Image: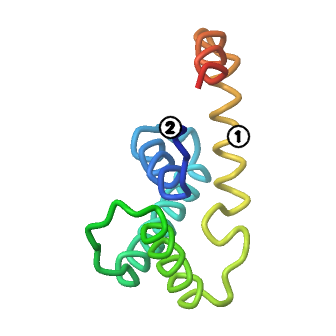
């Protein structure tokens, strides 16, 4: 079975990065704080809109519940748009960090691991 990376997984990864990263500048620090605040607000909204979990092995039921939960979050954020969570400042920060990692001393290992995944 293939594993799918969900938006939630990406957000959690980004939160981990922000908690572990050492900002080089005051601008980076501000961007990381802003990003953390945005993620926390989004996660709180998702929790408040979540549906009660039902015990089911049916792919149809699970898919329907997922769609309903997604619809609830979308209804709660009718004006949502790209950049609401990943501001240009934080996107630039992550791009710099990724570049440093991919071209750093362990870059070849990281790239090989990504290709395998």
| Residue 24 rendering spot, x and y as whole percentages | 56, 38
Circles 1 and 2: CB atoms closer than 8 Å: no
Which x, y percent locates residue 109?
59, 11
Q: Nearer the viewer, residue 68 or 18?
A: 68
- Crowd class of label 1 (few under 14; some 14 to 19; many from 20; radius 10 Å): few
Q: Residue 65: give x, y in percent of width and height.
A: 44, 75
Residue visible at 72% across and 48% down?
92
Residue found at x 66% / y 10%: 108
Image disc number at residue 1: 2
What residue sits 47% from the left and 45% below the top? 13
Q: Quadrant of residue 81?
A: bottom right
Q: Residue at x 53, y 89 (%)?
A: 76
In this rendering, position of residue 14 left or right of residue 84: left
Query: Front-most of 38 and 56?
Result: 56
User: Which residue position is annotated with label 1?
Assistant: 95
Residue 106 shown left or right of residue 44 in the figure = right
Q: Which of marks 1 and 2 is in front?
A: 2
Q: In this view, does 114 lie above or below 84?
A: above
Front position in the image: 90 or 22? 90
Secondary structure of residue under mark 1 = helix
Q: How is the image coloured?
A: rainbow
Where 26 sits versus 34, above or below? above
Q: Gap between marks 1 and 2, in whole Å?
A: 31 Å
Q: Quadrant of the C terminus?
A: top right
Instruction: Please tell me how many numbered marks the rendered image carries.
Output: 2
Q: Position of residue 14 (x, y in %)?
A: 51, 48
Q: Nearer the viewer, residue 35 or 14?
A: 14
Q: State the mark number for residue 81.
A: none
| Mark 2 secondary-structure assignment | loop
Q: How many residues crowd mark 2 within 10 Å: few (<14), some (14–19), many (20+)?
A: few
Which is more N-terminal, label 2 or label 1? 2
């Amino acid at each position: 079975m293939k594993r799918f990376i969900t938006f939630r997984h990406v957000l959690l990864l980004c939160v981990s990065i922000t908690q572990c990263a050492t900002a080089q500048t005051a601008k980076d620090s501000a961007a990381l704080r802003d990003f953390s605040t945005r993620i926390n607000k989004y996660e709180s909204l998702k929790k408040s809109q979540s549906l009660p979990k039902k015990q089911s092995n049916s792919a149809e039921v699970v898919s329907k519940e997922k769609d309903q939960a997604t619809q609830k979050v979308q209804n709660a954020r009718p004006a949502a748009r790209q950049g609401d969570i990943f501001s240009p400042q934080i996107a630039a920060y992550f791009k710099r960090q990724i570049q440093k990692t991919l071209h750093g001393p362990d870059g070849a290992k990281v790239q090989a691991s990504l290709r395998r995944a």
